[in-house]
Image: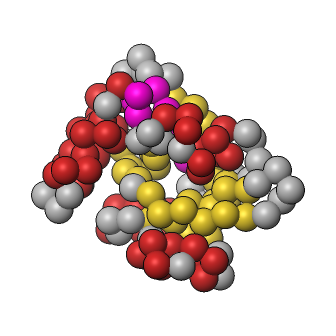
Amino acid sequence: MSDAYAQLQDHVGHTQTVTIVTTRADGTPVAAPIWAVVVDGVTYVRGAYGARTSWFARAASGRPVAVSLADGSVAERDRTAALDDPRVPVVASRVAADDPAQAAISAAYEAKYLPTSPEHVPPVISADAVAHTFALLRAD
């Protein structure tokens, strides 16, 4: 595991909201605050509202994806400012809805987010979100 990817996993493990940076078709980067979890050494994110989630659609396009090493609250306040934060490039790889890892991913979302945001967890563990899961893998 590269040092940057290890930093990313540590960051995801200790930060409620992270910033994913995806790329528009014209090459413009876009920052979005999201939730992420680490399960068995792999970082996962979900499009809670399926394919209509903008960052998800951009990541699914195959264009560059990165995750910021700064607190995602920056992107919640100012998405443009969040683009200045240090980031780690990743490869977004779809995870099949029937992949056995999905149960552990849902459990990780519940464990991490139910204590602080119970009203927002159901959409992230719904069947639609499960069908829109990415593993964020090392890009190097």
Q: Position of residue 73 (x, y in %)?
A: 41, 75
The residue located at (49%, 35%) in the rendering is 50
Q: Is residue 104 positioned above or below 100 on the image?
A: below
Q: Is residue 37 positioned above or below 131 on the image?
A: below
The residue located at (64%, 41%) in the rendering is 57
The residue located at (46%, 78%) in the rendering is 77
Q: Which of 68 and 61 is in front in this view?
A: 61
Question: Is the image coloured rainbow, by chain, by secondary structure, or in one colour?
Answer: secondary structure
The residue located at (73%, 56%) in the rendering is 23
Q: Where is residue 25 in the image (x, y as percent from the top left)?
A: 82, 50
Quarter that holds the N terminus: bottom right
Q: Position of residue 9 (x, y in %)?
A: 45, 60
Residue range of the region highlighted in magenta in the rendering: 128-137
- Which residue of the protein is positioned furthest toward the front in this rendering? 52
**Residue 10 appears in view:** no
Q: Position of residue 56 (x, y in %)?
A: 58, 44
Q: Quadrant of residue 31?
A: bottom right
